Image (cartoon, rainbow, N blue to C red):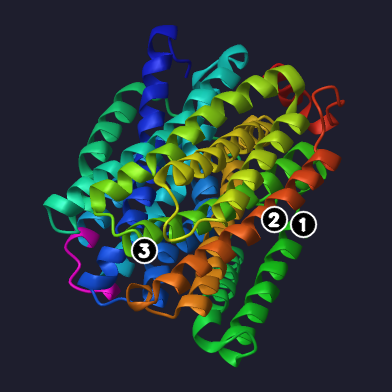
Amino acid sequence: MSVPPSRRWWALSALMLCALVVDLDTTVLNVSMPTLARELGADTGRLQWVLNAYTIVMAALFIPAGALADRLGRKKVLLWALGLFAAGSVLGAYAPDTGVLIAARTLMGAGAAAILPLTMSILPTVFPRGQLSKAMAFASVAGMVGFPLGPVLGGFLLDHFWWGAVLLVNIPVVAFALIACAVTLPESGDRERPGFPPVATAVAMLGLGAFMYGVIAIPTHGRLSPHVIAPVVAGIALVALFVRGQVRAARPMVDFGLFADRNFLWGTAAAVYVSLALAGLLFVFPQYLRLVRGLDGVETGTAMLPFALGMLAGGQLGSVLLRRTGFRPAVSIGMGLLAAGLALGALTTAASPLVFIAAWTALAGAGVGGAMVPAMTAILLTLPDASAGVGSGLNQTLRGVGSALGVAVLGGLVATVAGSRLETAATGDLVTGMAVVLAVCAVGSVVTGILTAAFLPGRRDEPGETTESTHDLARTA
């Protein structure tokens, strides 16, 4: 079903709302972490589960959600996913304890698992190839809008209402997104695509869940504890079994041959690392602002605006560099900006001027946007149209794993330095914990930037045989 030109940009607006609602929730909840610790009596481990229940479920369900949407219809699955996300938001808003809140976050993660990949995979059915790269740029920016909106709105709600309001704010956004998607989007899919075998899907989900459980248990039990080693080893084994089965299958649910394409491989590597570093930063920075600097909710959200605005500016810079220089220089420059911002952030003290904090967070945000936009463009323009849902789901799976690892591992570093209950930790320990996290992320950014500079193709590289048309388009982006 073709979309008339007059409806294309309305359809894009609907998809942008879908991306907005997921990222809005992420930043709103990060700002509220200190409040949740106080109101619900949650230690760092529980706070990590509140965040990771969302990201782990997303990572586990991205691929089956994409495959289901390719077979049943992407619009239909997207509408159901938005409804599930709204239900989880309501349940979480009225959660009496962290157990119910974690369950609500699980529901929201299941909805988001379909929302995020489908916002991208639907675009080729709405726009002709000549307009696709421009549409993807707008869709990418939509997610970034959630970052400046989320902290400010979340801070206002925390100061004037109870903490559950930060989840209820999702409801009007979801309502508008549901109506807009129902009216403007065409149905698309491929009923001939293979479905998701229950056994293989369960193996993948259990493997990822076991692996992440072990990682999250590190701060509590120690790296060499059986509580850590057993689930991590079991998780790796199950995921390896899933990959092996898919590689050997005549009609696999997931085409791991995509990683033979250097655009997909190194674009994914850059996007995953940025997701990891971003998750770690958004876990420690709001807590520094509230627990060390003593800022209230609105002040915390306002202090995060330079980072969010930096992301928006960096996304525009990444788009310009992509058109003028190609994938390799654009991603590498973005990673360099991210490394510089994080390295400066590691020098932050309890008495650092807010101007200095605004400067390094804006620089780090510019790096996030500058690296992520060209990396995601390299990935999305590699995917075949018929399997766009599951291909986008594969990429989102890896980014979700990166985000979960960012919270689990980097949050574990903070807990090691400052203790399991951050709200009672000494100010110096909290500052040291944040410095360690930012320094580690800065080093990782440098390494990732060097690798993408060495291996990510530039725009003059010849396309592979299986992705010729999309690479031709990529070189015009």
Of the residues tagged 3 and 1, which is closer to the observer?
3
| Residue found at x 61% / y 65% | 200
Assign a secondary structure to mark 2: helix
Image mark for residue 292: 3
Q: Nearer the viewer, mark 2 or mark 3?
A: 3
> Is 444 left or right of 200, judged from the image as shown?
right
Q: Determine the residue positioned at 49% across, 50% down.
A: 65
Front residue of this view, candidates 3 and 370: 370
Q: CA distance from mark 2 to mark 3?
A: 26 Å
- On the image, the x and y values in percent for residue 344 come to 59, 49
Q: Nearest the camera: 166 or 258?
A: 166
Amino acid type, callout 3: Val
The earlier-in-sequence mark between 2 and 3 is 3
Kindly indicate whether the residue at mark 1 contacts the one at mark 3 (C-beta within 8 angstroms). Answer: no
Query: Is any atom of residue 248 visible in this view?
Result: yes
164 vs 275, left or right, is left
> Magenta span covers which residues?
92-99
Judged left or right of residue 127, residue 12 is left
Residue at position x 58%, y 55% from top? 276
Q: Gap in Å between the C-alphas at discs 3 and 1?
A: 50 Å
Residue at disc 3, secondary structure? helix
Q: Quadrant of residue 424?
A: bottom left
Confirm whether the magenta stretch covers residue 93: yes
Circle 2 sits on which residue?
444
Residue extending farthest to the bottom is 226
The relative height of residue 161 versus residue 379 in the rendered view (above or below) is below
Disc 2 marks which amino acid? Answer: Gly
Q: Position of residue 4 (x, y in %)?
A: 43, 9
Amino acid, disc 1: Val
